[in-house]
Amino acid sequence: MRINKLPVVNKFNIKKTAKVILTAVLLSTPAKVAQDSFVKNLPRYDEILKCETLPHRIEKVQKSLKNFIPITVINERGGVSHTYCVEDLKKIQNILKTSRIKTSYVFPIDSALHPYIPSTGQFGSPRPAGRAHLGLDIYPRLYGRKPPKPVYITSATDGVVVSAKKSPEKDPKNLIANSIKIMSPDGKMYSYDHMARPEDYNGSKYFDIKAPGEYVKAGDTIGIVGRTGETAVWHLHMGVEDLNEMNRQLNNEQWQKLHKKYGVYAVPRGQVDPLNKLKAGEISDILNKYRIDKGPKVDYLDKL
Ligand SMILES: [Zn+2]
């Protein structure tokens, strides 16, 4: 049903309509039947939430974000790392929380292509020099070969874009290069990294359809699977970050040591395992369907 075709329902109308229905029914039928039809005729509370107040709430979120100014952070290598500050994130998180918008969840690329998550692409899997992988790698094609056609990345959740970063070239200073970060109403931040450049596919568009402060719905296109930043294969690196977890990491001695040792590879941002339901929540159910476990997986971060 289209939103603009729905009758206007508000508290006052519900009360008024209910009163009219109740009076009419009471006059003509026994009490039990009267109550049944009264309940049946009432619009469901969750329907009202969805149809009547959601656009209004999103508008409110966007209004509150009018003064949101993305800031540029330069990483230890001299590359642009991300473009938001933690205080802004907390503000956005709070606005979303009080607006009580619920998100739905989708797999972030076309599942008809048979994508998969290899054990080497999982959270905590080993990387050179003893460090660990802090996100999830989704391969649209076997062995991370280049897909012949652009594979579009869709937002896994509803949310507000807090950072959208473009690198015109493959930038050795950047690990993730083209990247977009979205704060979801579930309180977590989802990032999508290594996205493609326009020159990777002739005539394809950049992901500049979304800008910081914009509200996206789960399933909206936000980019194309690429190979920008520090990677040799075509894949989507998806990250799930939790601000509460970030505070824990910042105060954790072992995390501090990891950051000191591995620099940009272990910045404490509240990274959690997207496949772990306790840590990442509902999105893990969808992601786990595409997981392939072959060979050992070292999840030493779990012990921190
Ligand atoms: Zn990765």
Image (cartoon, helix red, strand yellow):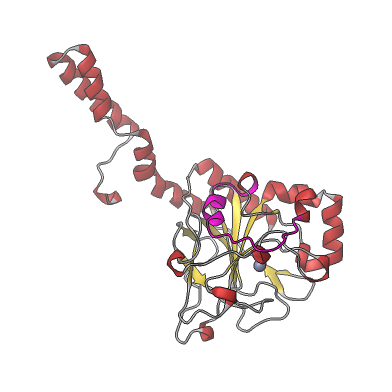
Work out whether 32 lies above or below 49. above
Predominant secondary structure in magenta? Answer: loop
Left or right for 169, reference 73: left
The spot of residue 199 in percent (x, y) is 53, 86
The spot of residue 296 in percent (x, y) is 72, 61
Question: Which quadrant would residue 234 be assigned to in this image?
Answer: bottom right
Highlighted magenta segment, given as a residue range: 279-299
Q: Is residue 298 magenta?
A: yes
Question: Which quadrant would residue 288 be assigned to in this image?
Answer: bottom right
Which residue, as the protein is rendered here, is positioned at the far top? 30
How many numbered discs? 0
The spot of residue 51 in percent (x, y) is 34, 45
Residue 83 visible to an observer of this rendering: no
Q: Nearer the viewer, residue 99 or 138?
A: 138
Residue 108 visible to an observer of this rendering: yes
Give me the residue at 60% from left, 83% from top. Answer: 168
Q: Is residue 33 magenta?
A: no
Which residue, as the protein is rendered here, is positioned at the far front? 295
The spot of residue 114 in percent (x, y) is 48, 67
Give me the residue at 55% from left, 77% from top. Answer: 196
Ligand 1, image quadrant it occupies: bottom right
Give me the residue at 59% from left, 75% from top. Answer: 143
Work out whether 202 lies above or below 233. below
Work out whether 72 lies above or below 233. above
Q: Nearer the viewer, residue 193 or 133?
A: 133
